[in-house]
Amino acid sequence: MFWKLLFADIKMMVRNRQALFWAFMFPLLFSFMFGFFFGKDAKNGTVAIVNHSDSQISTKYVEALEEAEIYKVEKDLDIDEARAQIKSGKIVAAVEIPEGFGDLPEQKAPQVQILPNGQVIMPEKVKIPEQKMKLVIDPGNAQINAGLTGFTDKFLSQLNLKIQGADEVFLFEEEKTNDKKLSYYDFILAGILGLSVMNSSVIGIAVSMSKYREDKILKRITTTPVPTWAFILAEVISRLMLNLAQIAVILAIGIYMFDANIYGNVYVLVGVAMLGALLFQLLGFVIASLSKTTDAAQGMGTAITIPMMFLGGVFFPIDSLPRWLFSIVQYLPLSPLLRILRGVSSEGLSPFSNPQNIYIVSAWIVAALLFSVWKFRLTDE
């Protein structure tokens, strides 16, 4: 009987093509969007270089900007065309290097003068006139502007030190906690995994159970020999199979299309994501227990998932939040799940490396299960 219910649930999901389409489209949309922006060969936009100088310094600046691979460099525009394309959004900024920039005056060998009274006069240091390049930027692109101005400032600062013959005294050195190469896309990939299983599980279970109750399907189940537990278990397993397909597709796109770096065991990563799917399915049952109608379940599910999407750490580390807010959101169901996922994928850690995260996820699972057992009913009566 259980297997017949399971196959029936799977057939119902497959036949509901619109729901199945959006179950995959929502995470795929995020995967491709962030992949194209931050994945393999992603650049921060195009910067036009309008170089009127043929000096070695100006050439070296252009080469350094190209080698940094932060931006795509465009060299075939004049400054007016560049300004127009910045306004239209086709390029993000432009650098105009004026004629003669980087040309240094010839310096003759220094001559020391000794006066008849024996006084020694040292030669004056040759002064180099101030030279400026122009950065044409869009005030609306604060992050792009910061990157370009920071790169240019560092290049020119090092150049000034060399010309003045000054020694670099105050320096810093980097110490990396590991030698792993990570990008923002690697960070966001774990967030997309958590987001996809959360949305499909919470909304899927809450809405379907409420729909079954409204259509009196759940009430009819109580009049048949079908055990209630078998019906619920078949529903959960069928949706877990959908979650597994979602996880596999997201990881395949991330790894094979956008060169995501997965340093941990992929099967462990999938297992953690499936644990999250089970957690959010139980939260779906909690919502279904509290909702009288399908619309109410839809609204309540959205009210829960949307704040967690932004505050759970999907798009940015929650450590950057104000301390009072961080102290709250770190205990949301999605936050510890994403910390475990990122520990496995980005650092190759065990899911139990930080037991607190497992404790929080387990506590949510137990709490949601107990509440659902207590409150969830197949009928309104």
Image: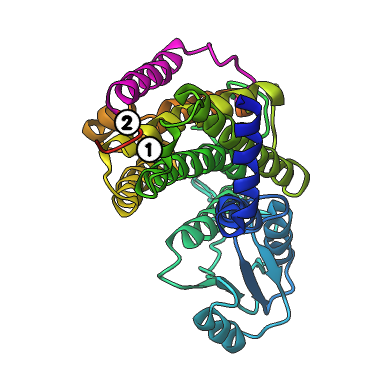
The quadrant where residue 3 appears? top right
User: Label for residue 302?
Assistant: none
Q: How many marks?
A: 2
**Vertical placement of residue 281 versus 264, above or below:** below
Q: Which residues are magenta?
A: 347-375
Question: Can see residue 111?
Answer: no
Characterize the local packing of mark 1: few (<14), some (14-19) or many (20 or more) Cα atoms within 10 angstroms: some
Pinpoint residue 157: horizontal percent, then vertical percent.
Answer: 54, 51
- Considering depth in this image, is 90 or 185 the residue closer to the camera? 185
Q: Identify which residue is drawn at 38% across, 45% down.
A: 216
**Is residue 2 one of those drawn in magenta?**
no
State the quadrant of the C terminus: top left
Name the main secondary structure of what is drawn in magenta.
helix
Q: CA distance from mark 2 to mark 1?
A: 9 Å
State the quadrant of the N terminus: top right
Characterize the local packing of mark 2: few (<14), some (14-19) or many (20 or more) Cα atoms within 10 angstroms: some
Pinpoint residue 168: horizontal percent, then vertical percent.
Answer: 55, 36
Left or right: where 120 falls relative to 63 = left
Q: Secondary structure at mark 2?
A: loop
Q: Secondary structure at mark 1?
A: helix
Pinpoint residue 269: horizontal percent, then vertical percent.
Answer: 63, 26
Disc 2 designates what residue? 377
Q: Identify which residue is drawn at 45% across, 33% down.
A: 281
Disc 1 designates what residue? 219
Q: Identify which residue is drawn at 54% across, 70% down.
A: 131
